[in-house]
């Protein structure tokens, strides 16, 4: 089973996917927010996904902002929609602080800027995968 991450934005959503061993990940795609429901429905039916990780924009002070609450509401909506399609998958939030900054390449072309959203999702996902692997190592000791 794989893990997918979403970097939800106001217009674009970055998507990253893990390998089956949940050790590494790669940027997958960037979709427009208004196309996300259809994308997720098709994607989650096609891919063996165990968890959907949603990047949560916590402030640098570690508090919630209006954007944080907006992302939570969007994620809850998409989770509910997927369940209505018979797709029941675990959804988790993951701190995405600085992921967009790390993914920024200073690109000027629209295609390169779109790609940055998927790269940001891969930073979010790799953080989650690394944490999950460490948790498993700790539990097994």
Image: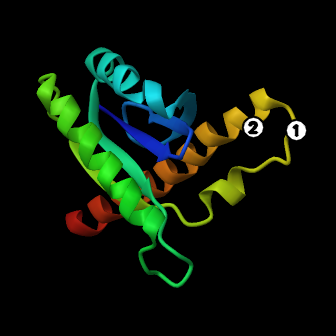
Name the residue: 21% across, 30% down: 82
- Residue 113: mark in rendering: 2
Q: Disc 2, disc 1: CB below 8 Å?
A: yes
Name the secondary structure under disc 2. Answer: helix
State the image coordinates of residue 29 (x, y, percent, origin top left). 56, 27
Q: Earlier in the sequence, mark 2 or mark 1?
A: 1
Relative height, residue 135 to residue 3 (above, below) = below
8 left or right of 132? right
66 left or right of 99? left
Label 2 neighbourhood size at 10 Å, few (<14), some (14-19), many (20+)?
some
- Residue 85: mark in rendering: none
Name the residue: 62% across, 64% down: 98
Please tell me in which quadrant of the rendered image residue 50 appears.
top left
State the image coordinates of residue 37 (x, y, percent, origin top left). 35, 27
Query: Camera-side residue: 66 or 80?
Result: 66
Query: Camera-side residue: 139 or 46?
Result: 46
Relative height, residue 96 to residue 34 (above, below) = below
- Residue 108: mark in rendering: 1
Name the secondary structure under disc 1. Answer: loop
State the image coordinates of residue 78 (x, y, percent, origin top left). 28, 38
Number of marks in the rendered image? 2
Q: Looking at this rendering, what residue extends furthest in the bottom direction? A: 61
Name the residue: 26% across, 17% down: 45
């Amino acid at each position: 089973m794989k893990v997918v991450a979403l970097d939800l934005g106001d217009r674009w959503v970055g998507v990253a996917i893990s390998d089956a061993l949940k050790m590494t990940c790669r940027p997958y795609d960037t979709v427009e927010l208004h196309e996300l429901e259809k994308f997720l429905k098709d994607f989650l039916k096609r891919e063996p996904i165990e968890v959907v990780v949603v990047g949560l924009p916590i402030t640098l002070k570690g508090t919630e902002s209006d954007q944080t609450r907006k992302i939570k509401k969007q994620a809850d909506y998409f989770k509910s929609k997927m369940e209505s399609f018979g797709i029941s998958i675990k959804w988790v939030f993951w701190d995405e602080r600085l992921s967009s900054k790390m993914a920024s390449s200073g690109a000027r072309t629209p295609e390169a800027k779109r790609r940055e959203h998927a790269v940001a999702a891969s930073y979010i996902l790799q953080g989650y995968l690394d944490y999950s692997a460490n948790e498993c190592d700790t539990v097994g000791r």
